Image (cartoon, rainbow, N blue to C red):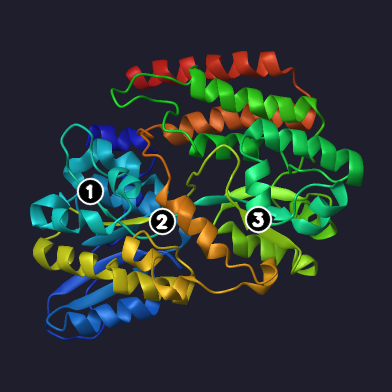
Amino acid sequence: MKRLAALVSVSFLALSGCQLPTSSGEEKPVITLWYWNRSLSDDVIAKAQEAFPDVTIEAQKIGGDEYKTKLHTALIAGRGPDIVAMNDWAFEYLAYEEEFVNLLDYGAGELEEDYLDWKWQAVEDPDSGSLIALPIDTGPTALYYRADLFEEAGLPTEPEDVHAALQTWDDYIDAAIQLKEETGAYMFESITKPYLQMLEQQSDKYFAEDGSYIGDGESIQTAWSTAIRIHEEGLSARLTDGQETNAALNGGDVASRVGAVWESQITQDAAPDTAGKWRVTRTPGGDGNNGGSFIGVLASSPMKDEAVEITKWLVSPDAQQQHYLDVNLFPSTIATLESELMHKPDPFYGEQMVADVFIESAKNVPPTFYGEHYGIFRDIFNDELVLVDRTNKNPDQAWEDAQRQAARELSRLEK
């Protein structure tokens, strides 16, 4: 419990009621479910209620900003909902596996082959083998690009040809130089985005499975040096997320972005005037994942058997089909990925079947280990790259400062 309190600073006094009584007044056992908007389909939850008529599923939709803190507070208190949705930060709770039901003790192992292996392994403790959650959705990455600007620059335009030409990040950067010379457009909106996406393509990040720090190792150095090359070649538009990025995407100042499948809708919303001009292909340097959520059962639940069965049902292949259709959650089950419903042309991408690209990406994401403190160290390096990109901070100094901050954080965590 002491370690849990250290993960995020919250006030015990902020604890709110975690086991709300059913509003229906029915005298049936209540299974409480916490989720945030669009993390699950409301219609699927309603159908789960029909599938489990002997209990009342009390689904509580909690605001995204407060969700993680409220969950953490509930864990500290030792009382919370029966079932919890968790974003991609679920792996942080592997260090506190005792707070969650080991789903393998409730037959979840029979379902393992239904799911993408890397997604399943992300919430499976490498030492104990405990499984603290089941996958909901995924965030496979791909290269979004403007076919019209690529054509103007003399670059390939068809997705298969672009993928063949841009196999590596060096290929991608060389194409960015040509694009800038011929059209004046930037290939990259910033240097932090390609840095983070490169990390998502690699198994090694800031920590090894034994907990040792590898943030000064080859994987991080390669991603860092690639981002610095983009900066030094003048290929970054130096944008941060927000209105300026939207304007650049809509105005043709930025011709591509590597991003997760959930960024498709963001791109469409940001750049409505460019409909029909975008295409999607496999990412230079390999497939990766960014985002995607999970769902687990708390060890404090007095109704573990029922909660686990409802959890399994909520992320079954059939349920994931409906999650995809209702709220566009990209599936984590192989059967759903291979279903016909995924193969539909998208007019924003010139009638391309873009899901085919993301499906192949999802099937080839390398298993990775994030570690409990991944988010802290990701932010340290990201913040230094922002300074390089936006203020021309000396890259060598930025690297030294990132390593110094990392060392200081490691020292703090060891206390």
- Is residue 101 toward the left or the right of residue 385 in the image? left
Disc number at residue 132? 1
Residue 284 % position (x, y): 60, 40
- Identify the residue at image location x=62%, y=72%: 346
Disc on the earlier residue, 2 or 3 = 2
Q: Which residue is labeled 3 in the image?
A: 159
231 with respect to 315 (left or right):
right
Question: Visible in this render: residue 342?
Answer: yes
Marker disc for residue 67: 2
Q: Tell me the CA gap for discs 3 and 1.
A: 38 Å
Q: Secondary structure at mark 1?
A: loop
For the residues bearing labels 2 and 3, Cβ distance under 8 angstroms: no
Image position, residue 120 (x, y; %)? 29, 49
Per the model, the C-alpha gap separating discs 2 and 3 is: 39 Å
Residue 86 screen position, x and y as percent: 35, 54
Q: Callout 1: 10 Å neighbours few (<14), some, many (20+)?
A: many
